[in-house]
Image (cartoon, rainbow, N blue to C red):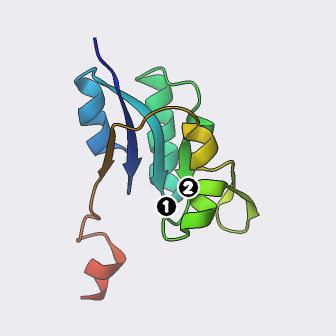
Amino acid sequence: MIKYNIIDIFAGCGGLLDGFMQSKHYNPVASIEWEKAPINTLANRLATKWGINDTEESCIRFDIQRIEELFKGFINDDNYGSSKGLDKIVGEKTIDLIIGGPPCQAYSVAGRIR
């Protein structure tokens, strides 16, 4: 069976990624989310339901707008902690697909402001 390497941005707690995982054709390489509770839920779900062992590394809690740090890594950030960055997490793997769920407007900051 062919497995495609996937990165999930705006991952939330992983609902979109879970759908891809259910097809058994995708290997999650990294997930990025800026809120703590959802990324922790996603890391736990990937570990317990899907047997992914490196969720502490591959589930990155970070602001995706800080592109250079996201790719190169960051250490002891006041809000997000540390990560070795996508460049090292991905390494020599080929990324076949990048998915991303738009924020749920009812719960997003933009939705609440309106």
Q: Residues within 10 Å of mark 1 (few under 14, many from 20)?
A: some
Residue at image coords 47%, 52% = 32
Numbered mark located on residue 19 in the image: none
Q: Amino acid at mark 1?
A: Glu
Residue at image coords 55%, 55% = 61
Q: Amino acid at mark 2?
A: Arg
Tell me where residue 14 sits by quadrant: top left
Q: Secondary structure at mark 1?
A: loop
Residue at image coords 56%, 69% = 66
Numbered mark located on residue 61 in the image: 2
Q: Is residue 52 above or below residue 18?
A: above
Q: Is residue 28 above or below residue 42?
A: above
Q: Is residue 70 above or below residue 31?
A: below
Q: Is residue 90 above or below residue 54?
A: below
Pointer 1 and pointer 2: residues touching (CB < 8 Å)? yes
Q: Position of residue 73 (x, y in %)?
A: 67, 55
